[in-house]
Image (cartoon, rainbow, N blue to C red):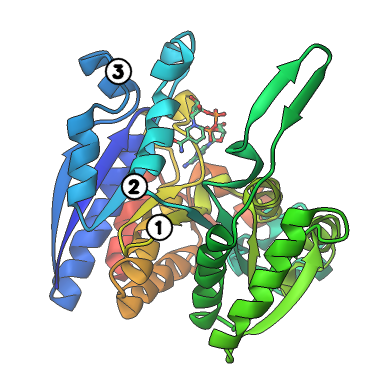
Amino acid sequence: MHKTIAVIRGDGIGPEIIREALSVLEKIAEKFGHTFTYTDVEMGGCALDKYGDPLPAEELEKCLRADSVLLGAVGGEKWNDTPGDKRPEKGLLRLRAGLGVYSNNRPAKIWKQLASASPLKEAIVERGIDFIIVRELTGGIYFGEHKTEGDTATDVLRYSEAEIERIARIGFETAQKRRKKLCSVEKSNVLDSSRLWKKVMHKIVADYPDVMLTDMLVDNCAMQIVKNPSQFDVIVTENMFGDILSDEASQITGSIGMIPSSSLGATARGLYEPIHGSAPDIAGKDIANPIGTVLSAAMMLRFSFNMEKEAQAIEDAVSAVLDEGWRTADIMPGDAEEAALCRQVGCSGMGQKILEKL
Ligand code: NAD
């Protein structure tokens, strides 16, 4: 199969982690007989320096012409005083809007090899943590009217049936590819928009008879994620609830450098990126953890290109490298006894180890 990939290296550690992900993709292409063609796209601080715009129209065009988009990270102190609409992160918001990606999917998974990094009790971690939060990305309170009149401020939370239905379908389809359990999270005991959300979920479930749908109130869900996370397979929720719950979920896994994400819309083209930022404090030192980006590339193969075997091969390679004790600095165990069983590698060293396993 031939696929085109727009590649945004971005700022800070972006170029380093993307380099490792591209080597892994090339290995997959060789092993499984595919051809991937890459187009470099400039976005973020680097584009701002060069063009005075964090995402020039031609750069967005390149993304729209590609089969999918892989992003490192953007931003950094150098651009902190840039006016709001010119900030590197603004390029990212414009990219998401331009690509029409309305669904953000973030896995929360504990690698058994890194279990001690979780802030949760061992007994809870041992039951296994492996779920995905599917968050609606372009509607709800973040996109409703915002206004301040005198001493009163208002933000409008609004959803249409159509907006709920399209994210619901992504939730069900994601569950179908996993353990077939979908938990719909809302606040239907208080909010009309949540009652509509629940109604639509229960209408759509008829199209997915193989998926078990459950409902949960968001406050309970926030508690369950730390109390009993192994109960979840896929959580689907609206924009603000998803924003908060996905940050909570990423923390229970204990390591920001390990977590990938995908953002999808109506087409197969998605935006894939690690959840962390450009980490300027460690940029250029070859110590960043590339695994979140490598796993984002695996998600791209699975969700945009329908290459399940290839995605699994990457995930298995990462797991095998962790089994052998290879660690970047951020995932080295704090405990001296445990650390003695591990070996530290840099960003390129970790990429190399994953390639060897492939
Ligand atoms: P950050 O995620 O960049 O870094 C937070 C901490 O985690 C730092 O100590 C960093 O060294 C560490 N870290 C992050 N990724 C790592 C990795 N792969 N391996 C090892 N350690 C890693 O968050 P921040 O410092 O708040 O933000 C830095 C810049 O990134 C800011 O300009 C911010 O706006 C931007 N940002 C960009 C994105 C994005 O591009 N999607 C997301 C978040 C933040």
Q: Single out the mark in the foreground, 3 or 1.
A: 1
Residue 155 on image: x %, y %: 71, 32
Identify residue for label 3: 48
- Whether ligand 1 has any atom under 8 Å from the Cβ at mark 3 is answered as no
* 84 with respect to 299 (left or right): right
Disc with the residue nearer the chain's start (3 vs 1): 3
- Whether ligand 1 has any atom under 8 Å from the Cβ at mark 1 is answered as no
Rendering quarter of residue 270: bottom left
Label 3 crowding class (10 Å Cα cut-off): few <14, some 14-19, many 20+?
many
Please give the name of the residue rendered at 41% of the width and 48% of the height, measured from the top-left corner: 273
* Type of the residue with mark 1: Gly
Whether the residues at callouts 3 and 1 have beta carbons within 8 Å, the answer is: no
* Type of the residue with mark 2: Leu
Residue 356 on image: x %, y %: 28, 65
Where is 58 relative to 356, above or below?
above
| Residue 161 visible within the image | yes
Please give the name of the residue rendered at 56% of the width and 54% of the height, measured from the top-left corner: 136
Disc with the residue nearer the chain's start (3 vs 2): 3
Identify residue for label 2: 99
Identify residue for label 1: 265
Alpha carbon distance from label 3 to label 2: 20 Å
* 329 with respect to 75 (left or right): right
User: SS at mark 2?
Assistant: helix
- Classify the position of the N terminus by image quarter: bottom left
User: SS at mark 3?
Assistant: helix
Please give the name of the residue rendered at 38% of the width and 49% of the height, measured from the top-left corner: 100
Where is 162 relative to 70, above or below?
below
The foreground one among 139 and 70 is 139
Alpha carbon distance from label 2 to label 1: 8 Å
- Classify the position of the C terminus by image quarter: bottom left
Whether the residues at callouts 2 and 1 have beta carbons within 8 Å, the answer is: yes
Residue 128 on image: x %, y %: 69, 73
